[in-house]
Amino acid sequence: MKLFLRLLMLLVVLVLAAGGYAAFETWHFLNTPPQSEAEETLFDVQPGQSMHKAASALEAQGIISNARYFVWLARYQKVDNKLQAGRFALNRAWKPEQVLEQLIYGKPVLSRITIREGLTWWQTGKLLEDAGYLSMANFQVLVHDPALLRHYGIPFANAEGFLMPETYLLHKPDVLNMDSARKVVGRLLDTFWAKTAKLWPEGKKPAADELKRILSLASIVEKETAIAEERPRVAGVYQNRLRINMALQADPTVIYGLGPTFNGNLRRRNLDDATNPYNTYQITGLPPGPICSPGLASIAAALKPELHDFLYFVAITDGGGHTFSKTLQEHNRAVQHYLRNRKQ
């Protein structure tokens, strides 16, 4: 009896919302799945996707028969803004209410997570741990595991630089053990090689020393600018400094060497610290390895830096572009201009 009353209320609401559509058509939508035989299908919900767009996609895939009625159903149940992002296992033999319930309250087969450019290995691990894919302890072991690194063709002491920035659909394990963590890490490393394959000169993976040079430079470029068109120019600045054996003096490398405990306040004593192996104020040449996982644009810039005579750059405004200079005098003037802008 309760189920009958609930369906009757739904019918009344949907008929009113439809502006007088036949009761039979609405009742038929609520009670008749698109097909009678069970047929499982996978359906992706994008992050921030509206119920309207999801309903249109559901109708296009034959999972529901009427997108407009489905949206009205979601509004009636007050869940039209509660879609989960992820990949869901749905069935074309389900009624609309069952489909909606799975999208709102069900567990996705795969969940979506975005790993943005410029994260260190520990930032990536924290992101994955917070999202429920693995434990940080297991992640730390794996990104430093010689056997795993060897298996994925990484000739370095850890996987820094190879945890490919991308939006992933990943399975959330019920138990966070080493095996489940290994699958996630392996997915990131496989994606690195798949995505970068098109960038390597003549399609050949670089030798270890060249790979370290490329990724180390790319990681610095990634941290120095978020503006795509600036990346080859920034790479060119550091290439010029390397050519004349001039210290790179890149703040992000110093910060990386300070590790996960860095509080965001870079001090003069940090720049003067010769015990930090990543301190490019104290060493010449590139740091011992990458300082984050760069995106494809930064890797491309490191492979082909812009040819110019610039040796310096400074931000125009916080979060904006940079002014590039050929001489220290020009650079000092640009720095003073930047500082004046910050005070205004």
Image (cartoon, helix red, strand yellow):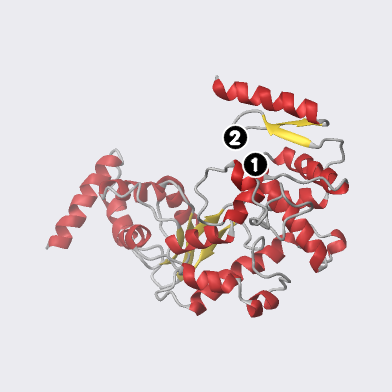
Looking at the picture, tell me which residue is in the foreground, 304 or 170.
304
Secondary element at tag 2 = loop
Image height check: is 137 above or below 258?
Answer: below
Which residue, given by chain and number where applicable, does mark 1 sit on? Answer: 226
| Amino acid type of the residue tagged 2 in the rendering | Gly
Looking at the picture, tell me which residue is in the foreground, 180 or 277.
277
Name the spot of residue 337 as percent of width and height, x first: 67, 22
Name the spot of residue 2 as percent of width and height, x first: 13, 61
Mark 2 crowd level (few <14, some 14–19, many ≥20, 10 Å Cα): few
Q: Are marks 1 and 2 in contact (CB under 8 Å)?
A: yes
Looking at the picture, tell me which residue is in the foreground, 71 or 153.
153
**Residue at point 57%, 52% (across, down):** 116
Please give left or right for residue 300 compared with residue 37 in the image.
Answer: right
**Residue at point 38%, 53% (across, down):** 83
Which residue, given by chain and number where applicable, does mark 2 sit on? Answer: 319
Name the spot of residue 294 as percent of width and height, x first: 67, 54
Name the spot of residue 232 as percent of width and height, x first: 78, 43
